[in-house]
């Protein structure tokens, strides 16, 4: 655009001319524009105008969802607590009304681009899979005639909360309401399977190996599923509470670069102008250059070789020793682990970034993995399988924490990361096998308690199996990053929140394909008109 004398008009003049043109229009059009402006919202950096009918439909649908969700959970809890079937029927009726309100809310109000992005998140896939497994258990081994329906309702609520990022128009009150209902329902179901009488003594699966009969109980399995759903959604729940502006996606995360500690690999020229000479090695961590002398490089290389070698022989001796009940090999496994510890301390000597370590402990997945490994060690000490169990539990704690916190080791090779990662996966898979198809912890009671004269037990075998499975699932994203990030630029277990406006973990850097697809999707909506 240019002025009358041919000079390009500045942005302010363009805006002024547009305003003058709009004032020249009829009063009716001006009133419609003002009314539309009143119902506008910002989305992807564009002003999205919403007609009154859409705004009214979304507002009433949200109210219906929150009210029916509250009453449904209230009727369900009271009905289960007092064994009153009429209230459970009322809970199902409220859920039906809630389903209708959900479909009214979702009508032409869903971004399939964001849904596709969410399905790239391991946590989202795992939560959805767990909810389907829980429903399948309630259908195949129902406690009452309401169990299959209640299982479906719980599955729907879990998936609605997890995929709520894909709903374009929604209020923060709806998100808080659904999130609160999600937490309350899961906590109550967890309570029923710990201190309540839900599915007490009900066998989910019975099988035999070499003439020995094994059982997997429904109560412990569903307890594990519900606990995992809560833990996997912990980061999303935290984001829901702290993100008052609703700029972030709840369940989508992005990778963090080691060189900057942010979503972008480079910041600015000043912070990325490094002074290492051609004869000295250097690496960049969180925007700071670390110089590496020849002696340190040589020490680290030999320490890594020692860790990989003795880790391999340690796991090999452990697996063969447990399988064939050969104590000498178990002693050899402990010896290899001891030498591995020495190599580990040689590796980390003046080679750890406490800044990165502090950043890792802000990750819910990291905290949960460290906590699970410590719980497993406590079980091995309190209820040992054999005399080696406490030592083996400590070795397991050490391996899990070394793999999870390896981002903080500044100088390391990709071969070390892959070696430790493979050892981590193999050891967890073997432990799951031992607590499922093996004879580890058969009949060992971890905790015995009574509620209202009824005795309950939590078995060591099912608890440890749940721990090993959760450790693998919580580290799934880190394991994937370990194998695909060949340049080792990314942090394995540290992630950043995804901004809805850019599709990346940075509010400034835009994922071109994501933003373009999302804008195209918004433009194609019949109800919403995008004014460019």
Image: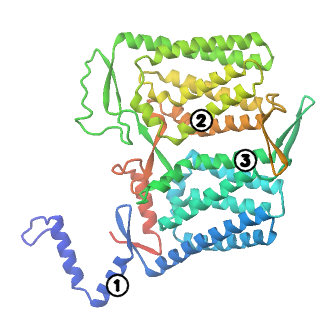
Q: Say if residue 238 shows up in the picture.
A: yes
Q: Identify which residue, 100 or 385, lies in the foreground.
A: 385
Q: Identify which residue, 63 or 428, lies in the foreground.
A: 63
- Dot 1 or dot 2: first in sequence order is 1
Q: Mark 3 points at which residue?
A: 223
Check the picture and name the quadrant holding the N terminus. bottom left
Q: At 54% from the left edge and 54% from the top edge, which residue is drawn?
A: 116
Please name the colour scheme applied to the rendered image.
Answer: rainbow
The image quadrant of residue 10 is bottom left
Can you name the residue that lies furthest to the front here? 453
Numbered label attached to residue 343: none
Q: Is mark 3 on a helix, strand or loop?
A: helix
Count of numbered badges drawn on the protein? 3
Q: Name the residue under label 1.
A: 32
Q: At 60% from the left edge and 13% from the top edge, which residue is drawn?
A: 338
Check the picture and name the quadrant holding the C terminus. bottom left
Q: Identify which residue, 303 or 81, lies in the foreground.
A: 81
The image quadrant of residue 38 is bottom left
Q: Which of marks 3 and 1 is in front?
A: 3
Relative to 335, 322 lies left or right: right
Relative to 318, 60 lies left or right: left
Percent position of residue 89, x then y: 77, 71
Q: What element carries label 1?
A: helix
Percent position of residue 216, x then y: 82, 41
Percent position of residue 473, x then y: 63, 39
Cβ atoms under marks 1 and 2 closer than 8 Å: no
Q: Distance between the residues labelled 1 and 2?
A: 58 Å
Cβ atoms under marks 3 and 1 closer than 8 Å: no
Numbered label attached to residue 371: 2
Can you name the residue that lies furthest to the bottom here? 27
Q: Is mark 2 on a helix, strand or loop?
A: helix
Percent position of residue 11, x then y: 18, 65
């Amino acid at each position: 655009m240019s002025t009358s004398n041919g000079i390009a008009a500045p942005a302010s003049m363009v805006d002024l001319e547009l305003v003058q043109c709009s004032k020249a229009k009829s009063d009716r059009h001006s009133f419609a524009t003002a009314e539309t402006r009143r119902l506008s919202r910002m989305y992807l950096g564009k002003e999205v105008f919403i007609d009154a009918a859409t705004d009214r439909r979304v507002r009433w649908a949200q109210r219906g969802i929150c009210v029916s969700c509250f009453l449904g959970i209230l009727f369900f809890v009271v009905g289960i607590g007092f064994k009153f079937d009429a209230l459970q029927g009322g809970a199902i009726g409220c859920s039906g009304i809630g389903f209708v309100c959900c479909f009214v809310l979702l009508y032409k109000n869903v971004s399939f681009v964001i849904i596709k992005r969410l399905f790239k998140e391991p946590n989202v896939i795992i939560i959805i899979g767990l909810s389907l497994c829980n429903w399948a258990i309630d259908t195949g081994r129902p406690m009452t005639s309401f169990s299959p329906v209640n299982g479906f309702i719980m599955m729907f609520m879990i998936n609605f909360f997890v995929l709520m990022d894909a709903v374009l128009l929604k209020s923060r009150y709806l998100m808080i309401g659904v999130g609160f209902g999600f937490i309350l329902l899961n906590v109550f179901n967890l309570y029923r399977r710990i201190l309540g009488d839900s599915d007490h003594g009900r066998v989910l699966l019975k099988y035999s190996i070499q003439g020995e009969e094994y059982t997997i109980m429904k109560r412990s399995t569903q307890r594990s599923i519900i606990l995992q759903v809560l833990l996997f959604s912990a980061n999303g729940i935290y984001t829901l509470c702290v993100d008052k502006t609703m700029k972030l996606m709840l369940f989508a995360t992005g990778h963090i670069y080691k060189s900057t500690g942010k979503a972008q690999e480079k910041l600015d020229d000043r912070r990325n102008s490094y002074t290492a000479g051609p004869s000295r090695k250097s690496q960049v961590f969180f925007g700071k250059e670390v110089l590496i002398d020849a002696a340190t490089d040589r020490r680290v290389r030999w320490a890594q070789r020692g860790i990989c070698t003795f880790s391999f022989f340690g796991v090999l001796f452990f697996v063969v020793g447990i399988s064939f009940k050969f104590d000498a090999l178990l002693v050899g496994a402990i010896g290899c682990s001891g030498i591995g510890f020495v190599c580990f301390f040689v590796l980390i000597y003046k080679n750890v970034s406490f800044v990165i370590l502090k950043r890792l402990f802000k990750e819910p997945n990291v905290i949960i993995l460290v906590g699970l490994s410590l719980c497993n060690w406590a079980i091995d000490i309190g209820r040992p399988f054999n005399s080696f169990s406490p030592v083996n539990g400590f070795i397991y704690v050490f391996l899990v924490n070394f793999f999870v916190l390896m981002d903080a080791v500044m100088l390391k090779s990709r071969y070390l990361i892959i070696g430790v990662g493979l050892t981590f996966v193999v050891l967890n898979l073997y432990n799951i096998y031992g607590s499922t198809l093996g004879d580890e912890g058969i009949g060992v009671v971890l905790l015995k308690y009574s509620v209202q004269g009824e005795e309950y037990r939590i078995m060591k075998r099912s608890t440890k199996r749940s721990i090993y499975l959760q450790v693998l699932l919580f580290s799934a994203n880190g394991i994937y990053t370990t194998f695909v990030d060949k340049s080792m630029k990314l942090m394995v277990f540290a992630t950043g929140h995804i901004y809805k406006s850019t599709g990346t973990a940075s509010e400034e850097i835009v994922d071109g394909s994501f933003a373009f697809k999302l804008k195209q999707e918004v433009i194609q909506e019949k109800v919403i008109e995008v004014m460019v």
